């Protein structure tokens, strides 16, 4: 810290540590989150030096120490012993295979459960770049049912075995070991991952690790305190001093970070989102300390977080409030279902901003969560990332690419269709960009403001999907949406000022040729939508209050389609009609006047 202008003393917890907050500028290369403040405290059992400096627990210098692991054991025991908001734990069917962790004198081995009941932990971690010689394959499966020497496993997996043993849990589920990779077993097991994480006693989360070799444990912790000798009432004493971050209790949690204090890689990976949402209990091994997370509490090793429920929304991490997949609550009423669907909107928004090693894994990476949500949806059916009830609204997803990217590719990275077919063009899973489903949010937000806030203009006749493998919630080899709606031949037009694309009807209504703004699905290398055979399909009218006078205005949502063959169309963009567009009118009646009701198939 340089240029210190002032100092502020505070205590966030009565009887807790004293926080010294300098106000100034950090030096080049300094981590502002972790070196900004100093925390002064004394350890339990030490002499009280000054009433303003209270007691606090020190962070373990080694998170593999018996003290740190005993603390984790205590958190688990407290939660299982009766946390009010946490689901009661009972033995559940074990995953198809689990790792019997054994003891310190025996090696772990793979155990085929055959549906037996039992207790197990699960591991959430980053694989890291290949090669992955340690994964289970058809050629290594048989020998691994006898023994897996710990020395053959990368450090993150070895540490997870040690943690599981210390917690007194006999089994551990790790995807790379318990799923036979490079086989059909992976396809079938991927669809059960949601079940596996939601039924685990606890999920061990390797937050501080960037790959399988970094490990869960931290040694030489720089948040470990130093003793500062003082003289109190003529006697020698000492207080403890350590660095800490300035952070709001309802905001980001500093201990949840990598060893370098940067963004947690685990929270950037697509596969880990469902693991984080579905796990009823998570034991985080961060780059600085261990942290417990459940529905009732979120204590950390340094105890900066009070041991009580907090409305935490961790930075770079999505927690869906009250999402309890193991509860008996189902979305049986319209309001409950809307709440469930709003959660799905949040999931898609967060998930599509995460990274996948294989971009075409979008559906498999959410298949476990989709399976759980379908059981809660009171008869609704999951369809390639969308939901059958209210499907026209779900079709109005928007690829989050720059508004200014019109005829040239300006998205970074550009949104693309996957090289290998895995989802139809009308599913968000068919593109690589971040995706937003704002129409669903808007319907929920303004529910009750008007009798019919949403007017459906598209009639869904039938849906057919052929799974690409054994996972019914994963990729598909083919999918068709047979529907009926207003179709209008259109062409593209670009404004000179903003270079924004519009679709303009080929036919004129009484007020002129209706127009709509284009939000493109993809930005390929040439950045162009192929000209010709373009059609506008009217889908939904959303009636919503104006921001200024609370009068209702209508937004029109449609799809820009390209004809592939007679009666078969591919989606290329979302088209939205806004009031007072600069280049013309959009009124729904104009589109319906120039359009033709027809049946068509979206592929």
Image (cartoon, rainbow, N blue to C red):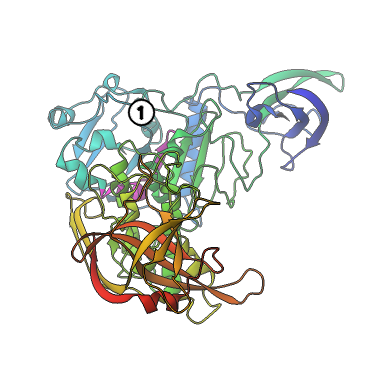
Residue 286 in the figure: left or right of residue 13: left
Classify the position of the N terminus by image quarter.
Answer: top right
Classify the position of the C terminus by image quarter.
Answer: bottom left
**197 inside magenta stretch:** yes
- Tell me if residue 6 can be seen: yes
Which residue occupies the foreground of this view, 268 or 148? Answer: 268
Magenta stretch in the rendered image: 191-206
Residue 30 x, y percent position in the rendering: 64, 23
Residue 5 x, y percent position in the rendering: 83, 28
Residue 148 in the figure: left or right of residue 158: left
Which residue occupies the foreground of this view, 394 or 425? Answer: 425
**388 inside magenta stretch:** no
- Tell me if residue 330 can be seen: no
The answer to which quarter of the image holds residue 491 is: bottom left
The answer to which quarter of the image holds residue 525 is: top left
Residue 270 x, y percent position in the rendering: 38, 42
Residue at screen point 28% across, 47% down = 364
Residue 426 x, y percent position in the rendering: 31, 58
Residue at screen point 40% across, 31% down = 163
The local crowd at label 1, few if under 14, some if 14 to 19, many if 20 or more residues have their Cα within 10 Å, is: some
Mark 1 — residue? 128
Residue at screen point 33% across, 26% down = 129
Asked which secondary structure carries label 1, the reply is: loop
């Amino acid at each position: 810290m340089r240029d210190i202008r002032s100092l502020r003393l505070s205590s966030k917890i009565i009887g807790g540590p004293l926080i010294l907050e300098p106000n100034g500028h950090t030096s080049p290369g300094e981590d502002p989150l972790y070196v900004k403040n100093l925390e002064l405290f004394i350890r339990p059992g030490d002499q009280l030096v000054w009433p303003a400096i209270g007691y606090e627990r020190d962070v373990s210098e080694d998170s593999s120490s018996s003290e740190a692991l005993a603390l984790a054991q205590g958190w688990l025991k407290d939660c299982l012993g009766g946390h009010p908001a946490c689901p009661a734990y009972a033995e559940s069917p074990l995953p198809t295979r689990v790792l019997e962790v054994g003891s310190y004198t025996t090696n772990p081995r793979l155990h085929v459960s055959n549906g037996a009941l039992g207790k197990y932990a699960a591991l959430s971690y980053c694989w890291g770049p290949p090669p992955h010689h340690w994964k289970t394959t058809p050629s290594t499966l048989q020998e691994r049912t006898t023994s897996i020497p710990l020395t053959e496993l990368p450090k993150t997996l070895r540490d997870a075995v040690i943690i599981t043993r210390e917690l007194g849990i006999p089994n551990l589920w790790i995807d790379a070991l318990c799923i036979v990779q490079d086989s059909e077993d992976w396809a079938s097991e991927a669809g059960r991952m949601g079940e596996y994480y939601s039924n685990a006693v606890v999920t061990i989360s390797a937050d501080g690790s960037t790959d399988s070799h970094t490990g869960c444990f931290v040694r030489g912790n720089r948040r470990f305190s130093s003793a500062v000798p003082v003289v109190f009432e003529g006697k020698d004493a000492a207080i403890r001093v350590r660095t800490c971050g300035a952070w709001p209790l309802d905001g980001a949690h500093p201990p949840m970070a990598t060893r370098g204090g940067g963004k947690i890689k685990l929270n950037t990976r697509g596969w880990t989102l469902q693991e984080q949402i579905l796990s009823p209990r998570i034991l985080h091994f961060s780059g600085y300390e261990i942290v417990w997370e459940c529905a009732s509490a979120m204590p950390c090793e340094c105890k900066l977080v009070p041991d009580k429920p907090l409305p935490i929304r961790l930075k770079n991490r999505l927690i869906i409030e009250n999402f309890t997949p193991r509860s008996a609550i189902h979305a049986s009423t319209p309001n409950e279902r809307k709440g469930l669907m709003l959660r799905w909107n949040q999931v898609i928004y967060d998930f599509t901003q995460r990274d996948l090693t294989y971009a075409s894994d979008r559906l498999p990476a959410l298949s476990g969560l989709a399976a759980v949500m379908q059981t809660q949806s009171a008869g609704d059916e999951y369809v390639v990332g969308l939901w059958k009830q209210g499907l026209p609204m779900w079709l109005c997803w928007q690829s989050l690419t720059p508004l200014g990217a019109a005829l040239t590719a300006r998205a970074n990275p550009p949104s693309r269709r996957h090289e290998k077919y895995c989802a139809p063009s009308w599913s968000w899973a068919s593109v690589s960009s971040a995706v937003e489903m704002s129409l669903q949010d808007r319907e929920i937000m303004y529910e009750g403001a008007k009798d019919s806030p949403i007017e459906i203009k598209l009639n869904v006749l039938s849906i057919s999907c052929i799974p690409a493998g054994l996972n019914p919630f994963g990729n598909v080899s083919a999918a068709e949406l047979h529907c009926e709606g207003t179709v209008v031949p259109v062409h593209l037009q670009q404004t000179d000022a903003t270079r924004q694309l519009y679709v303009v009807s080929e036919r004129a209504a009484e007020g002129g040729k209706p127009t709509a703004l284009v939000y493109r699905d993809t930005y390929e290398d040439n950045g162009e939508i192929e000209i010709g055979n373009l059609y506008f399909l009217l889908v939904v009218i959303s009636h919503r209050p104006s921001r200024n006078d609370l009068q209702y205005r209508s937004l029109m949502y449609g799809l820009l389609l390209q004809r592939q063959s007679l009666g078969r169309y591919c989606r290329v963009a979302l088209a939205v009609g806004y009031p007072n567009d600069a280049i013309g009118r959009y009124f729904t009646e104009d589109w319906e006047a120039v359009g033709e009701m027809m049946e068509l198939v979206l592929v």
